[in-house]
Each structure stands twice: as C-alpha cells, then as structure tokens.
Image: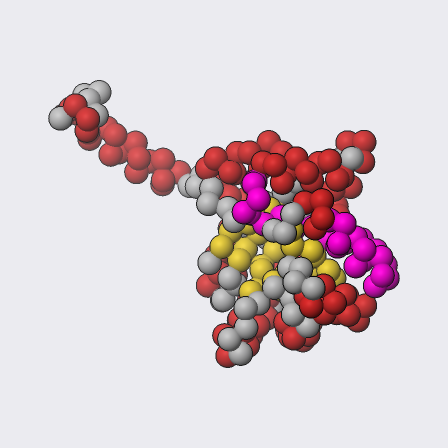
C-alpha cells in the first residue's frame, strides 16, 4: 500500500516530504497549465530535485497521436530520470502507446480509467498503474468501489505487477474506501492529507495526555526521569 501526493505546488510538495510517507508525486495537465510563464519542464525538474531520484514522478503526455505521445514520453524520461511514470489515457491510441512504451521498459500509468474494461485493457497492455478516477466516477453514477475491487481481484488472480492507483478524491472517506477495496496506491491532494489529521478528537486526546503528565511531572520530559 503506497501513498502519492497529487500536486505540482512546490511548497506543498516540500511540506509533504517533511511530514508524510509519500512514495512520489502525481501531476496532471490542469496543474501544469497554471505554472507561471509556462515553464513546465523547469518546474518538473525542480520537483524531481525535491523528491530525489528514488521517488516516482507521474506526468501525462499531451500528444494527440501515437508518434507524438511516444516522443514526449522519451523526452520526459530522458530529462527527469527512470523513475518518471508516463501517464497515458486509456483509449485505442493510448493502448498502442502503452504497449510500445512498456516494451521499452518505461513505466506507464494508464490514466482516465472509468470502467473495469478500460482497466483490464490497460493491464493487458502492460501498464504499471491503472489510474481510476474515483470521484469523477461517482459524479457519473459509476460504482467506483466496485470497479476498484474488480480490477484488484483480476490483478491478484493473474499475479500481475500492475497496481490500481486511485485518484480524484473529494474527501478522506473516498480515500479509505479506495484502499479498503483493493487500491494499491492512492494519490491525494495536500489539503486532504491535512484533513485526515485535523479531527478535534485527535488534538483533544493529545491535550489530555499532556495535561495528565504535567499534573505529575510538570515540564519534565522522559529524558529527565
């Protein structure tokens, strides 16, 4: 079970690296379109510097044809390292690109997955990750939990190295449901990670323990006893 940060914001990434057990960072075209001055590659290089060579950086190709997508993938990997996962939409054209890139040893995330069949095709084409868009599926009255459970079951049965990567969450309940139904990886926005630790009961419990300790030992720590 792994956790990715869904953000291209440098300050949010720095905070997450310091506090959370993230395996890497996911970006999407919408995030990258907001980068000041359109300096996308230099921004991605900065993210790579921050997260190091061992963590994954997921980036979606934007070409509309097979040749362009493959060239974009080669360029991104050459500039950002082997731990760059190339996100490719699971369409007919995308499946052809996934097969080509995986045959070259490039890690691919089959993205924009809304159905079990899409996920199966991405898996059979060699994708390392199947990016299931949880909340967007719910908005279309698609049972996201069922799709994740079915895909994770197929992957387990076929001993595939592919993992279900759940994305597009509105709240923490959706994240925990995705994990509970078999997602091997979830990518989560920074604000949702903070929300997961923001329950009043957590701070209340910490305060209670601190009060009870201080009532006996004052400001002493365990190092002083």
Q: How many marks?
A: 0
Region rendered in magenta: 51-76
For residue 46, which quarter of the picture?
Answer: top right
Quadrant housing the C terminus: top left
Q: What colour scheme does the image use? A: secondary structure
The residue sitting at the top extreme is 219
Q: Is residue 220 left or right of residue 167?
A: left
**Would you say residue 143 sits in the magenta stretch?**
no
Residue at the image position 55 percent from the left and 47 percent from the top: 55
Q: Position of residue 52 (x, y in %)?
A: 56, 41
Residue at the image position 76 percent from the left and 50 percent from the top: 75
Residue at the image position 57 percent from the left and 72 percent from the top: 151
Residue at the image position 65 percent from the left and 66 percent from the top: 127
Q: Position of residue 167 (x, y in %)?
A: 61, 55
* Of residues 148 and 124, the one drawn nearer to the viewer in this rendering: 124
Q: Position of residue 63 (x, y in %)?
A: 83, 55
**Would you say residue 63 sits in the magenta stretch?**
yes
**Residue 203 versus residue 145 in the image, above or below:** above
Q: Position of residue 12 (x, y in %)?
A: 58, 35
Q: Is residue 118 left or right of residue 146?
A: right
**Residue 62 versus residue 92 in the image, above or below:** above
**Residue 225 versus residue 204 in the image, above or below:** above
* Of residues 51 and 225, the one drawn nearer to the viewer in this rendering: 51
Q: Is residue 7 visible?
A: yes
Q: Is residue 195 left or right of residue 78?
A: left
Q: Is residue 5 visible?
A: no
């Amino acid at each position: 079970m792994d956790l990715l940060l869904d953000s291209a914001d440098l300050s949010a990434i720095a905070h997450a690296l310091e506090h959370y057990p993230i395996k890497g960072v996911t970006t999407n075209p919408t995030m990258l379109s907001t980068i000041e001055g359109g300096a996308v590659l230099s921004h991605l290089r900065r993210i790579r510097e921050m997260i190091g060579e061992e963590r994954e950086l997921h980036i979606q190709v934007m070409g509309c044809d097979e040749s362009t997508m493959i060239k974009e993938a080669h360029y991104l990997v050459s500039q950002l390292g082997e731990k760059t996962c190339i996100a490719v939409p699971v369409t007919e054209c995308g499946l052809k690109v996934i097969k080509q890139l995986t045959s070259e040893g490039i890690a691919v995330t089959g993205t924009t997955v809304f159905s079990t069949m899409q996920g199966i095709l991405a898996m059979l084409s060699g994708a390392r990750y199947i990016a299931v868009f949880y909340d967007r599926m719910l908005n279309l009255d698609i049972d996201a939990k069922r799709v994740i459970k079915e895909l994770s079951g197929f992957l387990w049965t076929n001993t595939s190295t592919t993992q279900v990567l759940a994305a597009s969450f509105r709240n923490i309940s959706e994240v925990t449901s995705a994990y509970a139904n078999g997602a091997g990886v979830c990518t989560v926005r920074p604000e949702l990670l903070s929300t997961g630790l923001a329950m009043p009961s957590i701070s209340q419990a910490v305060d209670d323990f601190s009060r009870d300790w201080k009532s006996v030992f004052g400001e002493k720590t365990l190092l002083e006893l």
